[in-house]
Protein backbone atom coordinates (compact mmCIF):
# COMPACT_ATOMS: atom_id res chain seq x y z
CA UNK A 1 0.00 0.00 0.00
CA UNK A 2 1.27 3.48 -0.80
CA UNK A 3 1.81 5.46 2.41
CA UNK A 4 3.66 8.64 1.35
CA UNK A 5 4.83 10.68 -1.62
CA UNK A 6 7.77 12.97 -2.24
CA UNK A 7 6.58 14.10 -5.70
CA UNK A 8 3.37 16.14 -5.48
CA UNK A 9 2.39 15.30 -9.08
CA UNK A 10 2.40 11.58 -8.26
CA UNK A 11 0.33 12.24 -5.18
CA UNK A 12 -2.26 14.24 -7.16
CA UNK A 13 -2.43 11.55 -9.83
CA UNK A 14 -2.96 8.81 -7.24
CA UNK A 15 -5.40 10.62 -4.95
CA UNK A 16 -7.27 12.92 -7.35
CA UNK A 17 -6.74 11.35 -10.81
CA UNK A 18 -5.04 14.63 -11.81
CA UNK A 19 -2.10 14.01 -14.16
CA UNK A 20 -1.09 17.67 -14.56
CA UNK A 21 2.21 17.14 -12.71
CA UNK A 22 3.26 14.19 -14.90
CA UNK A 23 4.69 14.19 -18.43
CA UNK A 24 1.66 13.40 -20.66
CA UNK A 25 3.70 10.75 -22.51
CA UNK A 26 4.24 8.95 -19.19
CA UNK A 27 0.83 9.30 -17.55
CA UNK A 28 -0.70 5.95 -18.56
CA UNK A 29 2.34 3.94 -17.46
CA UNK A 30 2.73 5.98 -14.27
CA UNK A 31 -0.91 5.29 -13.38
CA UNK A 32 -0.35 1.56 -13.95
CA UNK A 33 2.80 1.61 -11.79
CA UNK A 34 1.03 3.43 -8.96
CA UNK A 35 -1.87 0.97 -8.93
CA UNK A 36 0.54 -1.98 -8.95
CA UNK A 37 2.65 -0.54 -6.12
CA UNK A 38 -0.48 0.14 -4.08
CA UNK A 39 -1.62 -3.48 -4.38
CA UNK A 40 1.81 -5.07 -3.75
CA UNK A 41 2.33 -7.00 -0.53
CA UNK A 42 6.03 -7.70 -1.17
CA UNK A 43 8.71 -6.31 -3.44
CA UNK A 44 8.56 -9.36 -5.73
CA UNK A 45 5.00 -8.39 -6.69
CA UNK A 46 6.64 -5.47 -8.51
CA UNK A 47 9.23 -7.54 -10.36
CA UNK A 48 7.47 -7.34 -13.73
CA UNK A 49 9.56 -7.29 -16.94
CA UNK A 50 8.16 -3.95 -18.12
CA UNK A 51 8.96 -2.31 -14.75
CA UNK A 52 12.69 -3.18 -14.73
CA UNK A 53 12.60 -3.15 -10.94
CA UNK A 54 15.98 -2.70 -9.30
CA UNK A 55 17.45 -1.61 -6.01
CA UNK A 56 19.70 1.44 -6.03
CA UNK A 57 23.25 1.40 -4.70
CA UNK A 58 25.46 3.46 -2.45
CA UNK A 59 23.77 6.08 -0.30
CA UNK A 60 20.39 5.17 -1.84
CA UNK A 61 20.64 1.40 -1.27
CA UNK A 62 17.31 1.32 0.61
CA UNK A 63 15.49 2.76 -2.44
CA UNK A 64 13.85 0.75 -5.23
CA UNK A 65 13.37 2.00 -8.79
CA UNK A 66 10.87 1.24 -11.55
CA UNK A 67 11.46 2.45 -15.10
CA UNK A 68 8.80 4.70 -16.60
CA UNK A 69 10.52 5.66 -19.86
CA UNK A 70 14.07 6.56 -20.93
CA UNK A 71 15.77 7.97 -17.82
CA UNK A 72 12.52 8.57 -15.92
CA UNK A 73 11.88 6.42 -12.85
CA UNK A 74 9.51 6.07 -9.95
CA UNK A 75 11.61 5.54 -6.85
CA UNK A 76 10.42 4.49 -3.40
CA UNK A 77 11.23 2.70 -0.17
CA UNK A 78 9.36 -0.57 0.47
CA UNK A 79 8.94 -1.87 4.02
CA UNK A 80 6.40 -4.16 5.68
CA UNK A 81 4.04 -4.33 2.69
CA UNK A 82 4.06 -0.53 2.27
CA UNK A 83 5.67 1.93 -0.14
CA UNK A 84 7.01 5.27 1.10
CA UNK A 85 8.42 8.52 -0.34
CA UNK A 86 7.38 7.83 -3.94
CA UNK A 87 9.24 10.11 -6.31
CA UNK A 88 9.12 10.69 -10.09
CA UNK A 89 12.62 11.53 -11.19
CA UNK A 90 15.33 11.47 -13.82
CA UNK A 91 18.34 10.51 -11.70
CA UNK A 92 20.72 9.62 -14.55
Image (cartoon, rainbow, N blue to C red):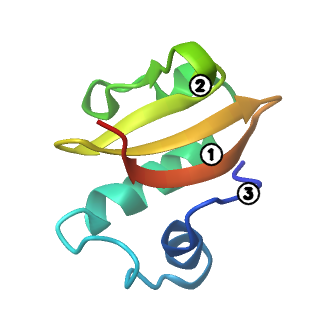
Q: Residues within 10 Å of mark 1 (few under 14, many from 20)?
A: some
- Percent of width and height locating residue 71: 23, 41
Nearer-N-terminus badge (2/1): 1
Residue labelled with disc 1: 39
Mark 2 or mark 1, which is nearer to you?
Answer: 2
Quadrant of residue 14 within the rendered picture = bottom right
- Relative side of 43 to 17, left or right: right
Name above or below for residue 22 compared with residue 17.
above
> Would you say the residues marked 2 and 1 are in contact, meaning their CB atoms lie under 8 Å apart?
no
Residue labelled with disc 2: 60
Q: Residues within 10 Å of mark 3 (few under 14, many from 20)?
A: some
Q: Residues within 10 Å of mark 2 (few under 14, many from 20)?
A: few
Nearer-N-terminus badge (3/1): 3
Which disc is residue 63 wearing?
none
- In 3D space, how far apart are the residues under numbered discs 3 and 1 (Cα atoms)? 14 Å
Callout 2: SS: helix
- Relative side of 48 to 18, left or right: left
Quadrant of residue 83 within the rendered picture = top right
- Percent of width and height locating residue 47: 44, 22
Name above or below for residue 79 compared with residue 73.
above
Residue shown at the point (55%, 79%) measured from the top left: 12
Residue labelled with disc 3: 4
- Relative side of 36 to 76, left or right: left
Mark 3 or mark 2, which is nearer to you?
Answer: 2
Farthest-out residue, front:
59
Name above or below for residue 18 compared with residue 35.
below
Callout 3: SS: loop
Amino acid sequence: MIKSFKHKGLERMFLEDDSSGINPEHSEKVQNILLTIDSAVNIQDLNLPSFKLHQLKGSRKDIWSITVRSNWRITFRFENENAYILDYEDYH
